[in-house]
């Protein structure tokens, strides 16, 4: 799998305890950032991921919208879940 989609950092962005909806900002290769939307009801699951337009996409190098993160959502979600990254940024 593409190392440019490897998560190098994660930060909590927004959370709603009542609805169980959370947002995290993830940092990928080449400094690209994305926003990952999660729900924890009934268990942690990523519902969407979008790229922030801070730098060009590390995959296709467009500096506008593309679907590379969406297309690789499963890989991104797996890193977050398997790596237990959520508990590392939530208290
Ligand atoms: Zn792209």
Image (tube, rainbow, N blue to C red):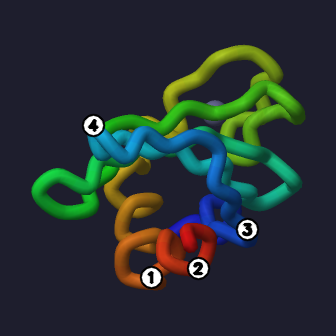
> Left or right: where does residue 14 sit relative to residue 81?
right
Location of ligand 1 given as a quarter of the image = top right
Observer-nearest of 54 and 88: 88
Could you tell which of marks 4 and 1 lies nearer the N-terminus? 4
Q: Secondary structure at mark 1?
A: loop
Q: What is the CA distance from the residue labelled 4 to the residue labelled 1?
A: 21 Å
User: Circle 3: is it few (<14), some (14-19), or many (20+) Cα within 10 Å?
Assistant: few
Rendered image: mark on residue 9? 3
Any atom of ligand 1 within 8 Å of the CB at mark 4? no
Kindly indicate the quadrant of the structure image that contains residue 28: bottom right
Say if 28 sits above or below 78 in the image: above
Callout in the foreground (2, 4)? 4
Place of residue 23 in the rendered image (x, y in percent of width and height, measured from the top left):
52, 43
Could you tell which of marks 3 and 1 lies nearer the N-terminus? 3
> Left or right: where does residue 91 sit relative to residue 72?
right
Q: What is the CA distance from the residue labelled 3 to the residue labelled 1?
A: 12 Å
Rendered image: mark on residue 88? 2
Say if 18 sits above or below 73 in the image: above
């Amino acid at each position: 799998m593409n190392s440019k989609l490897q998560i190098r950092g994660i930060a909590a962005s927004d959370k709603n305890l009542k609805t169980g909806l959370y947002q995290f900002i993830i940092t990928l290769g080449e400094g690209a950032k994305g926003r990952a939307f999660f729900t924890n009801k009934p268990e942690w699951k990523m519902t969407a991921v979008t790229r922030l337009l801070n730098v060009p996409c590390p995959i296709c190098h467009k500096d506008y919208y593309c679907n590379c993160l969406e297309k690789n959502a499963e890989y991104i979600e797996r890193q977050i879940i398997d790596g237990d990254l959520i508990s590392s940024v939530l208290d």
